[in-house]
Structure formats: C-alpha cells, structure tokens
Image: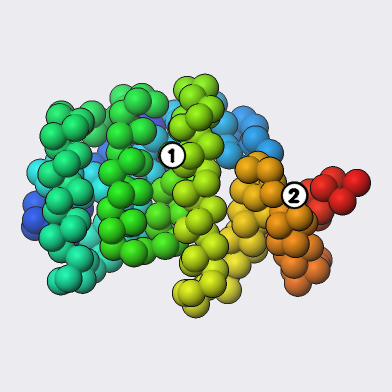
Amino acid sequence: MPEFWYKEFVCQLCGNRFNYPRVFSDAISVESRDEDLKPNFRGVNALYHQVVTCPECYLTLFERDFGTLSIPEEKMDKVKRVLENAKREFGELNLGEDKNVDDAIKLFSIAAAVYTVMNHKRGAAEAYLKLAWLYREKGQEKEEKIALAKALKFFEAHFKEDITNEKEEPMILFYLGELNKLLGSRKEAVKWFSILANKYRGVPSPYVKAAQERWQEVRD
Ligand SMILES: [Zn+2]
C-alpha cells in the first residue's frame, strides 16, 4: 500500500510552485495516545508530515494554512527574517518522505517562529505543542517543557483575545487544562477541566471525555 502522495502547493510568500509529500489517511495508524492525547503511530509517523515547507524560501505552515493564509504586509519583513535565520541555522532541510524526528523538529521550529511573528496565536500554540511532542519522542525533557510552556502561553492568549471557533473550543479548553497540569499548576488545570466538563457534558468528544477523567483525577 502506498503511504505517500504528492500535492501541489503555491507558496504565498515567494510564489514557488512545488509538490510536497502528504501521507495517505489509510496509511495512518494510531497505536496509542499519551495522557495529553499525543498520538503514537504504528508505521509512518504522520506528525512529521503535518507542516508544509517551501523548498525555496523555507516558509513553513500547517497544511491548512499553506498557500491560503495571507501574510499581512507589515509582518512580511519579520517573516522573511525568521526564514533567513532558519536557512543559516539549519542549512539544507529534508523535505522528503523519509523525514526523521530531527528533521521534523527543524520544520516545527520554523513553523512556530513564523506563526509567532505573525501573531497567529492559534497556529503558534499548535506548532509549539507538536514541537514539544517531538522533543518527547527524543527524550529531551528540558526542551519539551519549554515548548509546552510556550504552547500554553499561546493557547491562553488565543482563548482570551481571539474569537474561538466553536468547534475547536473543547480542544482549546482541554489543552488549557492539560498543559497547566503538565507544568504543575493544578488549580488552573482543575478550573479549565471543570469548565470543559460542565459546558460540554454529554458531547461526544475525546477532549470532553479526557477532561472528565482528569477533573476527577486532579480533584482527588
Ligand atoms: Zn516560498
């Protein structure tokens, strides 16, 4: 069974047109999940392939944003500077099917920096969360903690300042609770888990289910 297919993207920053490997959904198999719902894959590690990188200018965004999310004129210089720094620091990137955890760490670091300078809090939160998961796969606990703390900061800012997409609210509330728990703020964790568990009682969602379990756990 083929694991990859190639999708054409047009870079919104430099206009480069390129094909990029995407994982067939049939090839994705989740073997287990960590407590914060990090998926652990059997076979292809789909996490490594969730961002798309322009081979020309290094612009790196989640697939849903690549080619579509417009970069405001006033943010352009900052984004370009981030990408120039990445080129200098990382040199050649592996953008192929055989990306390993180190390759993915580079790509998610670029994505996190791009979303950060664009002040795109939702994107930065997810990029830092997934960067933390990659560090966990490598056993780099210190780097994982730093990335989790940044993810929490951006989830909080996103929840406070932006209009949250209603469909995403359970996920956002779950990570506000879970990241506070992982970083040792039990009181804050209980607060967010209880909001989620009460507001979405009976709603079939893995985040609601997990929040109900955690709420019970942290209160005990
Ligand atoms: Zn580009």
Q: 65 or 107: which is nearer to us?
A: 107
Q: Residue at x 44, y 61 (%)?
A: 122
Residue 205 rendering spot, x and y as whole percentages? 69, 58
Can residue 22 be seen in the rendering of this structure?
no
| Distance in Å between CA atoms under marks 1 and 2 | 23 Å
Q: Secondary structure at mark 2?
A: helix
Ligand 1 within 8 A of label 2's CB? no
Q: Which quadrant of the rendered structure holds the N terminus?
A: top left
The numbered mark at residue 34 is none
Height in image: 39 above or below 196? above
- Please count the marks in the image: 2
Q: Of circles 1 and 2, which is in front?
A: 2
Helix, strand or loop at mark 1 = helix
Which of pointers 1 and 2 lies earlier in the amino acid sequence?
1
**Residue 193 placement, left or right of 90:** right
Q: Which residue is mark 1?
A: 131
Position of 217 with respect to 73 (left or right) is right
Q: Which residue shows up at 30% across the image and 34% down it?
A: 106
Q: Position of residue 66 (x, y in %)?
A: 27, 56
For disc 1, does the CB lie below 8 Å from ligand 1? no
Residue at (9, 56) in percent of width and height: 14
Amino acid carrying mark 1 in the image: Leu
Q: Pointer 2: what residue?
A: 186
Position of residue 214 relative to residue 145, above or below, is below
The image quadrant that residue 182 belongs to is: top right
Percent of width and height locating residue 168: 56, 65
Q: Position of residue 62 (x, y in %)?
A: 35, 52
Picture layout, residue 118 above or below residue 148: below
Q: Residues within 10 Å of mark 1 (few under 14, many from 20)?
A: many
- 10 Å crowding of disc 2: few (<14), some (14-19), many (20+): some
Colour scheme used in the picture?
Answer: rainbow
Residue at 60% from the left image edge and 67% from the top image edge: 169
